[in-house]
């Protein structure tokens, strides 16, 4: 514990390299550091991929960042859509079990 009574691993600063530049970032928990660094790495890789793909255009850094932001925004929406399907899958499983029980009742 530190002098304020907080756990030592809370709210610590790290340096993240994003798009070739270092930025300070305050982690809420030490256990989040790996995830935060992976997110930074994913972002940097995606920036590099888009910059390479559009290297023969007149796209500037702003354009590349806009496309990368759009890419990740689309990924979030696709993941949300998949997650929204779970109640449907649960209902299908439930109906499948009920159907199997109904069929078994005729085999007796």
Image: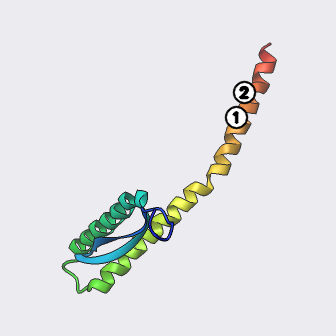
Residue at horizontal 43 percent and vertical 62 percent from the top: 8
Task: Find residue 101 and report its image quarter.
Answer: top right
What is the count of numbered marks? 2
Picture coordinates of residue 97, whole percent (x, y): 71, 31
87 vs 6, nearest the viewer = 6
Find residue 1 and name its label: none
Find residue 100 and name its label: 2
Determine the secondary structure under disc 2: helix
Structural distance between the alpha carbons of marks 1 and 2: 6 Å
The C terminus - image quarter: top right
51 vs 45, nearest the viewer = 45
- Disc 1 vs disc 2: Cβ atoms closer than 8 Å? yes
Determine the secondary structure under disc 1: helix
Residue at horizontal 22 percent and vertical 82 percent from the top: 57
Relative to 33, say whether 58 is above or below. Answer: below
Task: Find residue 17 and report its image quarter.
Answer: bottom left
Task: Find residue 24 and report its image quarter.
Answer: bottom left
Find residue 96 and name its label: 1
Picture coordinates of residue 88, whole percent (x, y): 67, 49
Query: How many C-alpha atoms fall within 10 Å of the one at disc 1: few (<14), some, or many (≥20)?
Result: few
Relative to 38, say whether 93 is above or below. Answer: above
Picture coordinates of residue 45, whole percent (x, y): 27, 66
Residue at horizontal 31 percent and vertical 79 percent from the top: 64
Image-based side of 50 in relation to 74, left or right = left
Q: How is the image coloured?
A: rainbow
Picture coordinates of residue 23, whole percent (x, y): 30, 77
């Amino acid at each position: 514990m530190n002098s304020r009574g907080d756990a030592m691993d809370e709210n610590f600063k790290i340096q993240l390299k994003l798009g070739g530049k270092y930025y300070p970032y305050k982690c809420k928990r030490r256990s989040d550091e790996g995830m935060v660094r992976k997110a930074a790495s994913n972002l940097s890789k995606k920036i590099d991929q888009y910059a390479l793909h559009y290297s023969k255009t007149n796209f500037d850094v702003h354009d590349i960042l806009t496309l990368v932001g759009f890419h990740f925004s689309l990924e979030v929406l696709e993941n949300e859509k998949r997650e929204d399907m779970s109640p449907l899958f649960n209902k299908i499983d439930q109906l499948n079990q009920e159907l199997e029980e109904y069929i078994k009742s005729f085999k007796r």
